[in-house]
Image (spheres, rainbow, N blue to C red):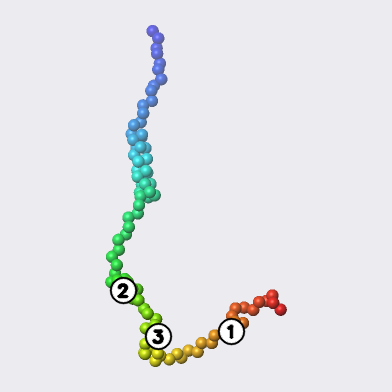
Amino acid sequence: MAIIIEKQKKSINWSAILIIFVLIIIIGVVSYFLFFSKVPLIEKIPSSQLKAINQISQIQLNPQSITQNKTFQLLKSYIILNMPSSSMIGKSNPFVK
């Protein structure tokens, strides 16, 4: 009688394959939410100060009505403004003799 020796078949480790498959799915879902999904907008309720600033910003000012006001014309200027001449503005050119 002859003895027949066959190679032992390696069994597949299904638990390791399942764990790797689950990890790939988790990494895919996490990368989708980190890089590809839209960021939800943050809702913020405006404060009462912001509402007041909005009302102030919508005021339309007419410069003519301000400058022609009698109270404005009674104001006096106590500052003397010396307007520099064109030769005094900026640095002198060192290349010009």
Q: Nearer the viewer, residue 32 or 66?
A: 66
Q: Position of residue 29 (x, y in %)?
A: 35, 45
Nearer mark to the viewer, of 1 and 3: 3
Q: Name the residue type under label 3.
A: Thr
Q: Under tag 3, what secondary structure?
A: helix
Residue 35 is situated, as x and y percent measured from the top left of the image, at 39, 49
Q: Residues within 10 Å of mark 2 (few under 14, many from 20)?
A: few
Distance of label 1 from label 3 (alpha carbons):
28 Å
Q: Which residue is situated farthest in the right direction here? A: 97
Within 10 Å of the Cα at label 3, are there few (<14), some (14-19), or many (20+) other Cα atoms?
A: few
Q: Is residue 53 visible?
A: no
> Amino acid type of disc 2?
Gln
| Disc nearer the start of the sequence (2/1) | 2
Q: Position of residue 76 (x, y in %)?
A: 43, 91
Kind of residue indicated by mark 1? Ser
Q: Which residue is mark 1?
A: 85
How far is disc 2 from disc 1 in space, using C-alphas? 43 Å
Determine the secondary structure under disc 2.
helix
Residue holding disc 2: 55
Quadrant assignment, res 64:
bottom left
Give the vertical position of 39 relative to 76 (above or below): above
**Residue at coordinates 30% horizontally, 71% vertically from top-left?**
51
Tell which tag, 2 or 3, sits nearer the viewer. 3
| Quarter of the rendering containing residue 41 | bottom left
Q: Which comes sooner in the sequence, label 1 or label 3? A: 3
Name the residue carrying label 3: 67
Residues at discs 1 and 3 in contact (Cβ within 8 Å) = no
